[in-house]
């Protein structure tokens, strides 16, 4: 194809049969990419596949990632259902959801304005570069070797009762947005950006929380005996002084707070 461009892009790309298809340039699929069967898949080598629709890979051998990158750049909702793992995975669309446990052995990048919703499925990634939003319920198993703690937002939207933060205890921006969900910390929490409780309950479990930027609580915070330390430049909006808004210990250790 000599690379993506006008007159060279695919619309839907469907791979079947027993013979392997090997890329020798980048390609772009404007809609869905489907790989069926356990033999005769697609080998990326070092090249990029851009996908504007849904991705389906039936077997772990359907897609040989090598060091290629797969980018989701659709203008409407996209889904990823892949038994095969990725190397580099880039999310450039505002609405991408998992339909199967997913692995990126290289770098998972979420662009500004983009969202990857784990949707209850597990995620494994070597490195996360998050300039957008990683969204999860809280029930998932999340393994990220190098977490992004200097940009981006992680949003928990599950409606269950969770005894830990599935993506670990270090974030840039952290948001809880669930009408009936509850998360209890199992360790100290460090938020290098802002912590926002839009909807739901955050319980310290008597652990401490460090927040570098803003604190906004519009629903429920159970302080226990945990300490909240504001260690940067913070605007603190608790939503009031009722039982669901109180702090236990507070330390103002940053340069300013309001």
Image: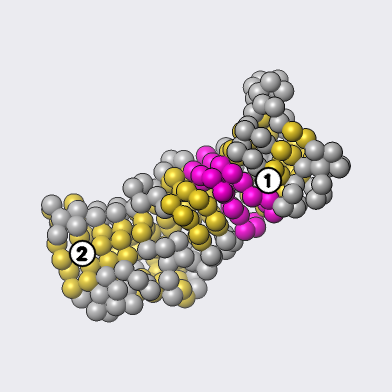
Q: Is residue 100 magenta?
A: yes
Q: Is residue 120 above or below residue 113?
A: below
Q: Is residue 49 magenta?
A: no
SS class of the residue under badge 1?
strand
Q: Please say whether residue 114 is visible from this viewpoint.
A: no
N-terminal-most mark, 2 or 1: 1
Quadrant where the image shows the C terminus: bottom left
Q: Please say whether residue 153 is visible from this viewpoint.
A: yes
Q: Is residue 1 above or below residue 153?
A: above
Q: Which residues are drawn in magenta? A: 82-109
Q: Residue at x 68, y 45 (%)?
A: 55
In the picture, measured across the screen, residue 187 lies left or right of residue 108, that is left
In the picture, measured across the screen, residue 48 lies left or right of residue 239, that is right
In the picture, measured across the screen, residue 129 lies left or right of residue 217, that is right
Dot 2 alpha-carbon crowd within 10 angstroms: few under 14, some 14 to 19, many 20 or more = some
Which of these two is toward me, 16 or 218? Answer: 16
Q: Is residue 245 above or below residue 3?
A: below
Q: Which mark is residue 55?
A: 1
Residue at numbered disc 2: 229
Q: Quadrant of residue 167?
A: bottom left
């Amino acid at each position: 194809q000599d690379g993506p461009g006008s007159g060279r892009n695919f619309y839907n790309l469907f791979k079947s049969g027993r013979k392997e298809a090997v890329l020798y340039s980048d390609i772009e699929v404007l809609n869905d990419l489907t790989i069926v069967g356990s033999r005769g898949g697609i080998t990326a080598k070092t090249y990029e596949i851009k996908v504007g629709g849904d991705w389906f890979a039936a077997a772990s051998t359907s897609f040989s990632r090598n060091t290629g990158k797969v980018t989701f750049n659709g203008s409407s909702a996209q889904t990823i259902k892949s038994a095969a793992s990725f190397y580099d995975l880039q999310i450039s669309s505002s609405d991408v959801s998992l339909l199967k446990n997913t692995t990126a052995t290289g770098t998972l990048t979420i662009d500004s304005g983009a969202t990857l919703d784990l949707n209850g499925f597990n995620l494994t990634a070597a490195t996360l570069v998050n300039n957008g939003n990683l969204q999860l319920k809280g029930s998932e198993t999340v393994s990220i070797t190098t977490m992004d703690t200097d940009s981006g937002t992680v949003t928990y939207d599950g409606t269950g009762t969770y005894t830990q933060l599935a993506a670990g205890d270090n974030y840039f921006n952290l948001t809880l947005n669930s009408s009936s969900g509850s998360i209890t910390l199992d360790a100290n929490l460090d938020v290098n950006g802002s912590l926002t409780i839009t909807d739901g309950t955050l319980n310290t479990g008597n652990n401490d929380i460090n927040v570098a930027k803003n604190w906004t609580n519009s629903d429920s915070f159970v302080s226990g005996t945990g300490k909240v330390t504001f260690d940067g430049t913070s605007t603190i909006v608790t939503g009031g002084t009722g039982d669901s808004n109180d702090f236990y210990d507070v330390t103002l250790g940053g340069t300013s707070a309001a």
